[in-house]
Amino acid sequence: MSRFQQLAEFERPLAAGYELLPFHFTALDDDNYVATNVAGEFVVLTRPDLEAFSSQSLPHTSALYDELKSKHFLIDSDSDVAIDLLALKLRTKLAPLANFTGLHMFVATLRCEHSCPYCQVSRANDDRTEFDMSEATALKALDLVFRSPNPAIKVEFQGGEPLLNFPLVRFVVEEAKRRNEAERRNLAFVIATNLAVIDDEILDFCRTHAILISTSLDGPADLHNKNRPRPGHDSHARAVAGIHACRSALGRDQVAALMTTTAGSLGRVREIIDEYVSLDFDGIFLRPLSPYGFAMKTKFYRGYDQARWLDFYFEGLDYIIDLNLSGFWFIEHYAALILRKMLTPFQPGYVDLISPAGIGIGAIAYNYDGDVYASDESRMLAEMGDKTFCLGNVHTHSFEDIFLGDALLGPLEASFAGSAPMCSWCAFEPYCGADPVFHHATQADFVGKKPLSAYCNRNMAIFRGLIQRMRSNPDVRAVFERWANLG
Amino acid sequence: MIALSAAQLSFNTPGADAPRQTIFLSDNPGRPMPLRQREGFLVRDGEVPEGFGWYLLHGEATAVAARLANQRVVLLPPELDYLGDGDVVRLNPERTALRVLYRRSSPHNHFLLTERCNNYCLMCSQPPRNVNDGWIIDEVIEALPLIDRDTVELGITGGEPTLLGERFFDLVRSAKSFLPDTALHVLTNGRLFVNPVQAETLGKINHPDLMLGIPVYSDLAHVHDYVVQADGAYDETIRGILNLKRERQKVEIRVVLHKQTYARLPQLAEFIARNLLFADHVALMGLELMGFARANLEELWIDPVDYREELTAAVNILSRARMNVSLYNLQHCLLDRSLWPFARRSISDWKQEYMPECDGCELRTQCAGFFASAKYRYSDRITPLDGSGWPVRNQKAGG
């Protein structure tokens, strides 16, 4: 046996101590802390353990030492490849930034035949064509779209109800595809529609051009119709009929639905989820209201407080987890986005939960009148009279004016979570994002005071909730790993 | 188990001494005349076409041998009966020996390039020897043009093949040139690719279907270094993998399962999924009781049933991360049923066997079976299974 050395021989260098790699920590609950490294790997540990680790006195014989070494929180004189791997993981997360703007939203019209009180866009009556985007404006916007270096370009039609200006939608799709014959981008289209006015001609067109449909579905008929009034009080029936029609015409996976939580939704999260299950969706995105547009004017945004929304969210999340544990595959998409950051080397490009912020460099909105906004929320803010995030106009400004101007770079730089007060030392920073539009809207500041920030409080509660759930039950962790790897 | 070499054969080499030679074997009496001089003819039914460089006869064909008095002849022992058309052998007349280099009918052809290695793994099935064996790769490179171009895969093993330096790259170039449609699977510890130039050299060859199988035994450097008995090996191997992937080479991560590695299998799986997600394949492999594995049996042996929980967790972590995972050398009856879809029939045909306990098992044709060497130690919980995968009821005990 003397030919072989014992394990103890190879452990000898460990006794010389260890160096800390960059990490942050935050309390998880009364007894435990979460520590995260720059790549978003996390370790849950007690306060005494945290103190021992951070004072470099954790014995190398402890199980926690192995975990911290394996997850790249420390290096000892035995091995320093952790630094290469950390760098690689960080690069993997940030690499998509170099692609620049991928999502380009066209506000085809502000007109809408719904009159939802929570609407985040101030709608216009559906007979006033001055709120329609013109072809001349669309052509100028397309010039900007193709200036983006992103190899994958997604054009999303927004409103109002964009199908009320279907000729413009058709014009943009055909023109974009014509240009793409030379551009060779991975070009995709989405129409965000309430489906109330969809017809066979539109479906034919969507099928021909492989256009995805994104619609609104708030839950069971009574809730949906209360949230989304329209002449005839048949919004739900039309949405459901539209979903079925789109699926037969375009394919099951070509239709997505989004819900918005109102005061009327609270207490009904299971019914809302059941509605999605029975309509054969693979998941649901449990979304709170945003403080913009009509939602503010009508006081809908104040209809419930953060704590009630979180109760709603977690009740729904737990119900969905139980569905999965009993063998039924169903996803909560917001959790899945965060879990992708927690459990994989990747960072999803979701514009509301990324840092640097997704405004402008992740997504951009071309309003019906040619004004260019840093995000969909930015133009909602503008409809309320605040044009802070208006980056220019397609008719009068160049690509450089719009994408390299102070109106965009200022808030991007100011809000960067890696250097923002309280964010930069928060353990959850690798999972979180920067939302200068939200903080400007609520606190008149791109950064905002985080203890007063509903964005911060909501996301912190969700980060903690997800970690607690996967920690307390390995089967939940398994479900979460599957969600995380959907991307 | 079948024999891949034979010595003390009966060679007949009239005239000048016959050189050592790598030859293509044929049983086709219609082979083009210009090729015959450098080929061997397998005499089957007494027909002896003229012009072949060698004639290979089965031992009892003495009547034919008499007719070949003026030809170079090798009399084959019964264990080489399987030799067939398209096989490639190395003849050493001086030592009256023959080695089978390539069998066209087998999916498991591999070449050992060197016995030298810069690791000294506790469980090495092919213990390294510090010998000057540079002649081996010359022979292999000589054999490549003789190998059937429809061959699906060739394995390259050692020792550590990359220790051959430029000659190793010559081999890859040669394989690309003569066997462009053949997958090349190289077992290496990857350490030398810590030098980016080495990885770049390989990348530039641009072999169309090359996979490097590289062992990673732990998420902890010191444990891996202990298993491979080489301080610093882990960092070199991991950096080697990163350099290879930067050069867009395919990398397979190989984990041998034994007493020193099983406990942290779930952590290793998490580490791989988080850090090496770009690996093209992960193979988790039962221990082969050859070489050092037998010498270190007590340090290494653990019944696969006793690491079932860790293995199941590890496979699930990798599979949920959408990695391509395989289990090698593990018997179906020892695995959690959920892992059967990952279990491959991995053991080379020439050393694959079953145990007496397998009698009556209806899943033998799906099961990996055993290495021939498993006779030294195997699980005492081998159980025959019926067609739907449940244990066959023991008639006596069942009463």
Image: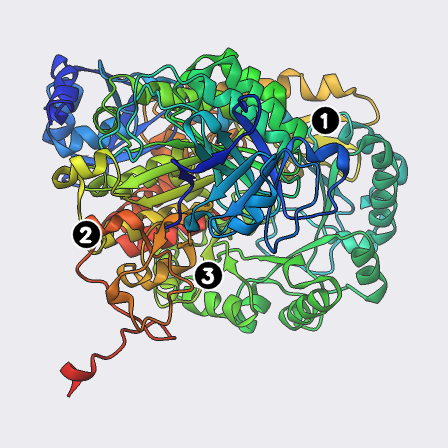
- Residue B49 position, x and y percent, is 70, 45
Which residue corresponds to the image point at 84% horizontal and 30% vertical from the top-left? Answer: A140
Per the image, the residue denoted by label 3 is A330
Query: Which badge, 1 or 3, comes first in the chain's sequence?
Result: 1
Report in which chain the residue with disc 3 lies: A
Foreground tag (2 vs 3)? 2
Q: Are marks 1 and 2 in contact (CB under 8 Å)?
A: no
Calculate the distance from the C-alpha at mark 2 to the C-alpha at mark 3. 38 Å
Q: CA distance from mark 1 to mark 3?
A: 35 Å
Report which quarter residue B221 is drawn in: top left
- As helix, strand or loop, the secondary structure at mark 3 comes to loop
Residue on which disc 1 sits: A148
Residue B43 is situated, as x and y percent measured from the top left of the image, at: 59, 48
**Colour logic:** rainbow
Q: Residue A162: percent from the left, percent from the top? A: 76, 51
Where does label 2 land, which residue?
B303
Q: Label 1: state its secondary structure.
A: loop
User: What's the amino acid at mark 1?
Assistant: Ser
Q: Amino acid at mark 2?
A: Asp
